[in-house]
Image: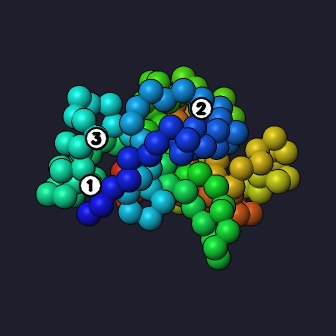
Amino acid sequence: MTIDLLDRTKKKKILEMLEKEYGISQLPHLFIKSGKEKIRIFSGSLSKEELNDLAKTVHVDSIGIKLLTLETFNGEKEGIRLSFDILNMPEIKSQITKNFLEITDEQLSTWLKGDNLDLDIKKENKELKSRFIIIKHNNDFFGIARNQGFLKNYVPKERRLRN
């Protein structure tokens, strides 16, 4: 598997997108592009050369943590979908100031079971302009939803509540 260690220019472009979408402006990590439009972050002590050597022998998901996926639909950029695992990382969580939706206890219960939320964001909240919206309850983030007339749930199946 090949990886692309992003240079300052590409990292700056990703950070500008994160700032515009979610308010995230500072991430002092090394940015790694892997697979189809997936960006991972790494803050370890390995050099770029060591990371490249490691990527040749180990699956790339072993390096760093997935930050986001650049989503496209029919060849057009649709937005940034943050990773489920990254949302409550303290240095990320403290920077999120945009495109999150506070939900009720009842909606949270539905969400955690893996169901979509039947909310039309365009009618309910005009401030949420992103295609991908962070779901928040109290002080915690519970995932990311795709705004498509309803909120499509992206919580991984293994993380959902079972009845």
Precedes in sequence: disc 1 or disc 3 = 3
Q: Which mark is residue 24?
A: 2
Crowding near the residue tagged with mark 3, few <14, some 14–19, many ≥20 C-alpha atoms within 10 Å: few
Q: Position of residue 45 (x, y in %)?
A: 23, 29
Q: As shown in the figure, which amino acid type bears the numbered disc 3? A: Lys
* Depth order, front residue of 32/159: 32
Q: Image height check: is 8 above or below 145?
A: above
For the residues marked 3 and 2, what is the alpha-carbon distance in whole angstroms? 25 Å
Image quarter in which the C terminus is found? bottom left
Q: Please tell me which residue is depicted at 38% across the width and 63% down the height of the picture.
A: 35
Q: Which mark is residue 51?
A: none
Q: Position of residue 26 (x, y in %)?
A: 54, 27
Q: Which mark is residue 48?
A: 3
Question: Which is in the foreground here, disc 1 or disc 3?
Answer: 3
Q: As shown in the figure, which amino acid type bears the numbered disc 2? A: Ile
Q: Relative to 123, is 17 on the left or the right? A: left
Q: Which residue is mark 1?
A: 60
Crowding near the residue tagged with mark 1, few <14, some 14–19, many ≥20 C-alpha atoms within 10 Å: many
Quadrant of res 152: bottom right
SS of the residue at dot 2? loop
Q: Position of residue 32 (x, y in %)?
A: 39, 47
For the residues marked 1 and 2, what is the alpha-carbon distance in whole angstroms? 25 Å
Q: Is residue 94 visible?
A: yes
For the residues marked 1 and 3, what is the alpha-carbon distance in whole angstroms? 14 Å
Q: Please tell me which residue is depicted at 42% across the width and 41% down the height of the picture.
A: 31
Q: Image height check: is 154 above or below 75?
A: above
Q: Residue furthest bottom?
A: 74
Q: Relative to 72, is 69 on the left or the right? A: left
Q: As shown in the figure, which amino acid type bears the numbered disc 1? A: Val
Q: Image height check: is 27 above or below 59?
A: above
Precedes in sequence: disc 1 or disc 2 = 2
